[in-house]
Image: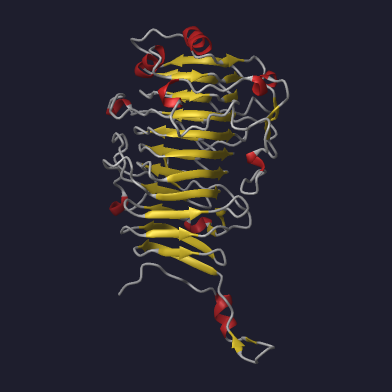
């Protein structure tokens, strides 16, 4: 029977068997314990990875056949750049990766000089509803694992809690990369909270359809978009951070692409902007920090928020600041119409950008100007814009190596009271806090917990 999971012992372990040591208590010979395990190919039976070993992914590893991969708190999963590891939890299978605040599960580079792209990424594929904008998975997965989605919005792909993913972003072809965490049509039965993506070569988080919800997410120093939502994603997210390294973007070539804190689409023009279900995330308590025109800022940085291609959205109780080309950008007719009609909204939030605070673009038949957008955002939706990021009042948000996102006492960030108006924000999923942004000014800062890494 052909084995599909390989445990390859290193040379040190092999030679160690020939030089076993004596136990001083009873004189017996004790073989050494191997702590490095290489993983290749497909996992078709349930597996349990423990923190006393380091697991190295060699290329694409597929958890398949309705299997469950359980990963203990404190376990490290690594990859080398010669064979960037990608962990794919495929339809019907589950991941049970439940770390703790003090012992997170860490996916990272195995190189001494760690760089983006050394690790491929984590991909979870479910059977929830999407709109078919992407026909297959991105990133060069094999033909047997390219399809995703289904009809079960309550689908359960397991648990992802207290997990950090570092140095991801396997580039297969131009425009075809693996993100830090990719979620394809993942259902609401899946638990996702306390996940950080660090120094990725492409997007930090990209969600392709699906209905799962998430809390406590951090995108830190990733080269492309931090929260990229498309293909009909219709879940909810609360308490999230997006923070950019001013000098770090991926290679855009001649694509005209830009890097943003948010980039949210429904479908491409070729697929029809209004293919259903329409991308419609409901988001609250985000803190998104752009490059703020710091010395050495990459020319490829774009917007704090880019809502486009027929997406609709609610983003409330947020702080978005330091966007390079604009703060709030609305592209394409249907996206604009959703905002005009009040279906979409940037509500009760604080906004700053280096150049244009509000921007409308790529419109044909819908009359919608930058001035109109500002009027709706600051009138109907109750948000505020600021000429200076300092006026918002976060303690030290642009200190990239050691950011402090706590609001200063008496500042706009500290005194603006959160609102959870309307059916979507009234959902029981949302914790009805009184503050805006991701960090409570009157409590312990959750972004300083042991599971979070800064300075990378």
274 relative position to 294: left or right: left
Residue most extreme to the bottom: 27
- Depth check: give the residue in front, 215 or 130: 215
What scheme was used to colour the molecule?
secondary structure
Image coordinates for residue 273, horizontal then vertical, percent: 31, 24
Q: Can residue 350 be seen in this view?
A: yes
Q: Which residue is rendered at x = 26% and y = 40% of the image?
A: 151
Q: Which residue is rendered at x = 28% and y = 54% of the image?
A: 144
Image coordinates for residue 358, horizontal then vertical, percent: 52, 15
240 relative position to 211: left or right: right
- Depth check: give the residue in front, 12 or 153: 153
Q: Which residue is rendered at x = 60% and y = 50% of the image?
A: 101
Residue most extreme to the left: 151
192 relative to 231, above or below: below
Image coordinates for residue 412, horizontal then vertical, percent: 66, 19
The C terminus: image quadrant: top right
Image coordinates for residue 248, horizontal then vertical, percent: 59, 37
447 relative to 370, above or below: below
Residue 398 falls in image quadrant: top right
Q: Is residue 225 visible?
A: no
354 relative to 6, above or below: above
């Amino acid at each position: 029977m052909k084995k599909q999971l390989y445990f390859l012992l290193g040379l040190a372990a092999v030679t160690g068997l020939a030089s076993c040591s004596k136990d001083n208590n009873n004189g017996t010979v004790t073989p050494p314990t191997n702590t490095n395990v290489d993983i290749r190919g497909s996992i078709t039976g349930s597996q349990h990875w423990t923190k006393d070993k380091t697991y190295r992914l060699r290329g694409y590893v597929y958890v398949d056949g309705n299997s469950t991969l359980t990963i203990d708190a404190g376990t490290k999963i690594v990859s080398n750049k010669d064979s960037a590891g990608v962990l794919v939890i495929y339809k019907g299978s589950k991941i049970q990766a439940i770390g703790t605040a003090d012992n997170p599960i860490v996916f990272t580079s195995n190189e001494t000089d760690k760089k983006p792209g050394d690790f491929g990424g984590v991909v979870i594929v479910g059977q929830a509803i999407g709109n078919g904008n992407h026909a297959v998975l991105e990133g060069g997965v094999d033909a047997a694992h390219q399809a995703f989605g289904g009809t079960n919005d309550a689908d359960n792909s397991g648990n992802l809690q207290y997990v950090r993913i570092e140095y991801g972003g396997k580039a297969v072809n131009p425009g075809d990369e693996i993100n830090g965490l990719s979620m394809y049509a993942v259902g609401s039965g899946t638990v996702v909270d306390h996940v950080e993506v660090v120094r990725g070569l492409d997007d930090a988080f990209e969600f392709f359809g699906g209905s799962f919800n998430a809390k406590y997410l951090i995108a830190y120093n990733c080269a492309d978009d931090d929260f990229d939502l498309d293909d009909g994603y219709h879940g909810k997210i609360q308490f999230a951070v997006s923070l950019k390294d001013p000098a770090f973007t991926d290679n855009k070539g001649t694509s005209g692409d830009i890097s943003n804190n948010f980039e949210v689409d429904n479908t491409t023009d070729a697929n029809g902007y209004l293919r259903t279900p329409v991308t419609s995330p409901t988001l609250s308590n985000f803190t998104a920090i752009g490059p703020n025109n710091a010395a050495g800022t990459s020319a490829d940085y774009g917007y704090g928020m880019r809502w486009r291609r027929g997406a609709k959205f609610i983003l409330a109780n947020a702080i978005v600041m330091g966007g390079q080309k604009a703060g709030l950008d609305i592209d394409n007719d249907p996206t604009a119409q959703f905002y005009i009609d009040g279906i979409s909204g940037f509500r009760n939030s604080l906004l700053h950008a280096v150049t244009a605070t509000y921007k409308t673009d790529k419109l044909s038949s819908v009359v919608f100007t930058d001035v109109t957008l500002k009027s709706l955002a600051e009138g109907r939706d109750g948000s505020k814009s600021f000429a200076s990021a300092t006026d918002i009042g976060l303690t030290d948000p642009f200190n990239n190596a050691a950011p402090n996102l706590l609001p200063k006492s008496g500042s706009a960030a500290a005194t603006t009271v959160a609102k959870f108006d309307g059916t979507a924000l009234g959902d029981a999923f949302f914790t009805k806090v009184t503050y805006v942004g991701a960090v409570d000014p009157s409590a312990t800062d959750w972004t300083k917990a042991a599971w979070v890494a800064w300075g990378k």
